[in-house]
Amino acid sequence: MFIINSLRNILENLKNNDYYWLKLKKREAVMTTAVMSHHKIDMQQESLRREGAGGSRILASAATFPALKRIALATIHLKKGGIREPHWHPNADEFTYCVDGKALVTLFSPQNICETMTLDKGEAVYIPKGITHHIENINDGESNFILCFSHETPEEQNFSSALCTMSAHVLASTFGVPETTFEPLLEKRHDALISWKREVTKPAHASIPSLHKINLDGTNPQIAAPGGTGHVANRHTFPAAQNLSLVSLRMVPGSVREPHWHPDGTELNYVVAGEARLTVFSPDGEVDTFTLTRGQASTIPSGYFHHIENIGRDELHMTVFFSSSLPGDIGISGALSAYANDVLGASFDLDPKFFAALPKISEDVLVVRGGG
Ligand SMILES: [Fe+2]
Ligand SMILES: [Fe+2]
């Protein structure tokens, strides 16, 4: 009797509290969901990881994921005291978003312009091609970052490896010191990438604003729809972003990012939290439906029709990067509304009354709650 009552309670609980979630799962089961998808990027692959004394980096480029075009993705995990060493990217801009923790970032640009800034959770920094930069964890715990590059195979030159390629004579002449001064450095000859220091220092001067930094999640969202919000960093809202853009997208459970496409820009999204389902329709007729969970990413070529659903119980948070500073967005709600009912009727071989029954929408709905 106890067991029967327990089962009854469990069923009642599911019926009352989890009905909508179960409905979503059922719908998921009847859809053809790809286990492997060439649009999907699993950032947990060990082969993509490079460890250093102060943390690790995972880099997904076209070398591993050929679907990446004009864009690449990385995550950096820094332990307390961890440092992504000073470096620059010869062929790519970088857009870095702080997922959690607190960092110090120093940019060094031509004309000896040096900017040091803090980077907190929800903030992002844009680093143009060739500009020297570093990321230093000044949090008491770990810090995590998502990085996007404006090239599918981003190159890098790190201080630790670059300096050691020059002779003692050249280095000593540059700094006006004896050649023996550089012997300890040249004997090292290594590529640190992620280094570590014992003392964590938090300079007081570093909190000044910078044109390279945006408090992305700390301001009012540019997209505030019934199903979610989007904080947008593009060339209009953040002029430093010249070749990439970023949307910090949050969707409530059950919501749908309406079917749409981007006329100018490859999309590269990463799940910070939650569970998503996407469908991508390719011009060759392929329909690719797949799910993403925390730590997974996908790329969608420019102009390809796609959608995003939150199929989890909790909020879905994604960072959505684009290979363009103004990628554009055409949603199906507005696109269908732009054409006369008889044109649509002829195209779908349906009575125009079908389309007359649909609301005409002058502005894209973007993110809807779902469920009709
Ligand atoms: Fe970098
Ligand atoms: Fe999109």
Image: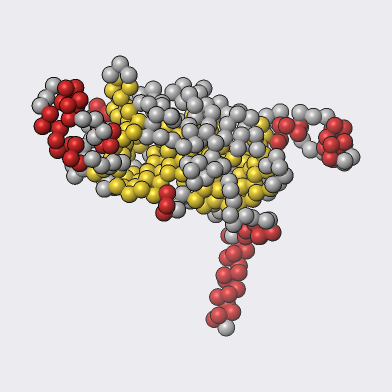
**Residue found farthest to the bottom:** 1
21 displayed left or right of 359: left
Q: x and y percent of residue 176 in the render? A: 13, 21
Q: How has the structure been colored for display?
A: secondary structure
Q: Residue at x 32, y 19 (%)?
A: 110
Determine the image quadrant of residue 127: top left
The percent position of residue 224, horizontal first and vertical second, equals: 56, 34
Residue drawn at (10%, 27%) of the image: 178
**Can residue 48 be seen at all in this image of the molecule?**
yes
Image quarter (top left, top right, bottom left or bottom right) of the N terminus: bottom right
Image quarter of residue 347: top right
Which of the pair 51/178 is nearer the observer? 178
Residue 277 drawn above or below residue 14: above
Name the foreground residue: 204 vs 162: 162
Which residue is situated farthest in the right direction here? Answer: 351
Count of numbered circles on the image: 0
The image position of residue 228, as x and y in percent, is: 56, 40
- At horizontal 34% and vertical 33% (from top left) the residue drawn is 157
Q: Nearer the viewer, residue 305 or 229?
A: 305
Residue drawn at x 67%, y 29% is 363
User: Seen from this angle, which residue lies furthest top?
Assistant: 111
**What x and y, as percent, mark residue 366?**
63, 36
Whether residue 218 is visible to the viewer of this picture, yes or no, is no
* In the displayed structure image, the side of residue 200 where residue 321 appears, left or right: right
